[in-house]
Amino acid sequence: MDKTDLAYAAGIIDGEGCISIVRCRRQDVISGYVNALKVSVGMVDDRVVKWLHQRFGGHFRTQRPTETNHKSVFIWLIQATQAQELLIQLLPYLKLKHDQAVLAIDFQSTKSVGRKYGSHSPKPIEAYDVEEKARVLLKSLHQGGEHSE
């Protein structure tokens, strides 16, 4: 990937994006939920969002306004390992969300070590605790927690 494109994408994510670990309900796991890494950008102009989708994959959708005087929002979303791989590429260029990206990369690394859990080998409760701590820490960084320059 071109360094200029990576720097541009990092700037968009720094300014308009969100790096998050979200809790998703799942009936097939003991805890009833899983934590998932997501990177998203939402804008009222679709050109940049479509560019991100074309360059990096993921999902693109339009959120229609609930109020008549509001505009539609175009949303690009990338998840899990695909989001981790993107953040690794963008890390040298991220300024505001650098620490969030590092935490997100580490979080996904703990999920991607090749362990597959199911009904015969459930995920240990300690693994849920580690994931939950990462989710809470990332949320605190969104709310103005410590960051590096």
Image (cartoon, rainbow, N blue to C red):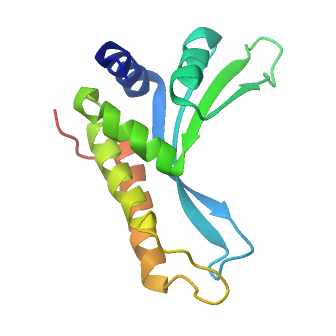
Residue 45 in view here:
no
**Residue shown at the point (48%, 36%) measured from the top left:** 18
- Say whether residue 119 is left or right of residue 69: left
Q: Quadrant of residue 91?
A: top left
Looking at the rendered image, the quarter that the N terminus falls into is top left
The percent position of residue 132, horizontal first and vertical second, equals: 45, 67
- Say whether residue 2 is left or right of residue 115: left
Looking at the rendered image, the quarter that the C terminus falls into is top left
Q: Relative to 115, say whether 109 is above or below.
A: above
Q: Residue at the far bottom: name it.
A: 120
Q: Relative to 101, say whether 64 is above or below.
A: above
Residue 106 in view here:
yes
Q: Quadrant of residue 25?
A: bottom right
- Say whether residue 42 is left or right of residue 103: right
The percent position of residue 106, horizontal first and vertical second, equals: 33, 57
The percent position of residue 38, horizontal first and vertical second, equals: 53, 45
The percent position of residue 37, horizontal first and vertical second, equals: 50, 51
Q: Residue at the far left: name it.
A: 149
| In front of the other: 117 or 142 | 117
Q: Relative to 123, say whether 97 is above or below.
A: above
Q: Relative to 70, say whether 126 is above or below.
A: below
- Say whether residue 45 is left or right of residue 63: left
Q: Quadrant of residue 92?
A: top left
**Residue shown at the point (41%, 37%) measured from the top left:** 86
| In front of the other: 66 or 114 | 114
**Residue shown at the point (64%, 60%) measured from the top left:** 24
